[in-house]
Structure formats: C-alpha cells, structure tokens
Image (spheres, grey):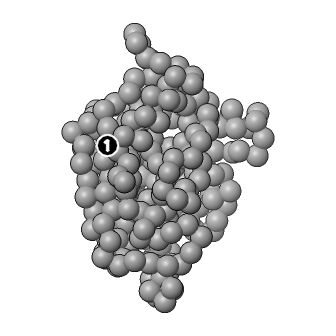
Amino acid sequence: MLNGLIYLAFFIPLSGFFSFAALVGSLVDASGGFAHRCALAWSRIGLMMAGVRLDVSGTENVPAGEPVIFMGNHQGNFDILVLSRAIPRRFSWLAKEELFRIPLFGAAMQRAGYIPVDRSDGRKALRSLDAAAKRIRAGASVIVFPEGTRTADGSLLPFKKGGFVLAERAGVPIIPFTINGSMQVNPRNTVKLVRGARIAVRFGTPIPTSGAGALKGTPLMEQVRSAIQSGLEG
C-alpha cells in the first residue's frame, strides 16, 4: 500500500502540471495537437514511475487515415495511461460530462478535443451520442470501454449498448483491443501498486459497422465481445 501512496504523491502533481501545460499550450495550438503530446508525455512518465513494462501487438490492424472507435476491456486505473502510449495515432476520449467541470483538468480535456457524454438521462445521452457521432464522422477517433466500469476479477462484464449505438451512428470501424495485466498492477478500489509488472495490449482486426456484411445491434455486440475475449490471457 505504501508504494501506491508514494506513487500518488508524485502522480497527482504530475497530472496537474501536464493539465496546466496542455491548457496553456492550447492557447497557441487550438488544434489539440499540443494537448495530445502533453497526454503522451504524462502517460510515459506515469508508466515509468510505476515501473510498468508495456507490450503492444497488432498495431498493423490500426488504420492511419480514417476515424475509428477503439473498443476493449477495462481492467484497472492504469488502462488510461497504457492506451495513451499503445495507440499509434491521435485519438480522443469519450468522458463523463461531469469530468469537464473539474477545474483545470476539465478545461485541458476540452482543449485536447475530448468528447463529453451526458448520461444523466436517456434523452440527454442520445443527444450526446449524436454529437459524438458527428465528431467521429468528421475525423475524430475515440476510445470506448463497453463494460462501462472496471472489472473486479479480470473477466468481461456485461456490455452496455451506448458504445455500439455510437458506432452504428458514426458508421466507422471498431478496432477491438484487449488489455492484460492492468488489474494486477493496481487492483480496483485500492492504492496497492505492484512495481515492475507487465501490461500487454493487443489490437484485433477492424470490425465494420456499415456496408455489406456489417452486423448491427446484439450480433455486433457479440462479435466485438468475442474479439476482445479471444485476447484475454489465463
């Protein structure tokens, strides 16, 4: 537990520094590119501080010239840092609308091009998904955790429909990914930190959401779940 507390003592100020840098930099670079580079540096240093060894495979499945939706499992607190390093192209996060109200951090997220989703009621959620789909069709790639929360034991939780509704409305491919080892580094609801551990990320074959042969609704959800499940170790 002490390792985790020491880590947080350094990581929280680090996050504040890079949030501030991203916010200030965005006054010069309104495209969000500088903010994204700040996020990459933040994740690199955060992983180094934790002594995490990152293994990435399947990057050849990630297209460079079109928007996509990255969709995968959610094992632990380090997933955000890991994906920031593992994805070989610029992307945006879908985030709860409440996070954008956090002083400094929320402003940095907005400047970086992250997309808010209001889940307070069904009607607002649908409007948020429509706005997000429009951003994606315009060129933004985003990450979705279809489980909606972190797993407690490493197994896949039931998937929520929102991410798949978004994918169908945007009409862009889904890139499935599987994270292994994140839960062991920092289990859910603890400050325990296992230094020197390995986290692996594997990207799968793109899954179409439009055009001939593309699945919809529950069959699409099951197809993506199968692709993510196939990459789980143990």
Residue at screen point 45% across, 28% down: 223
Query: In the rendered view, would you say 221 is above or below 142?
Result: above
Residue 78 location, x and y as percent? 44, 65
- Extreme-front residue of the structure: 234
Q: Amino acid at mark 1?
A: Phe
Q: Residue at x 37, y 66 (%)?
A: 43
Is residue 161 rendered to the left or right of residue 52? right
Q: Nearer the viewer, residue 163 or 133?
A: 163
Q: Residue furthest top?
A: 212
Q: Is residue 18 left or right of residue 99?
A: left
Secondary structure at numbered mark 1: strand
Is residue 132 visible in the rendered image? The answer is no
Residue 227 visible from this viewpoint: yes
Q: Foreground residue, 159 or 118?
A: 159
The residue shown at (63%, 44%) is 117
Residue 233 position within the rendered picture, expressed as x and y whole percent measured from the top left? 35, 52
Residue appearing at x 51%, y 35% in the figure: 135
Name the quarter where the C terminus is drawn.
bottom left
Looking at this view, is 185 or 63 the one in front? 185
| 41, above or below 70, in the image | below
- Residue for badge 1: 203
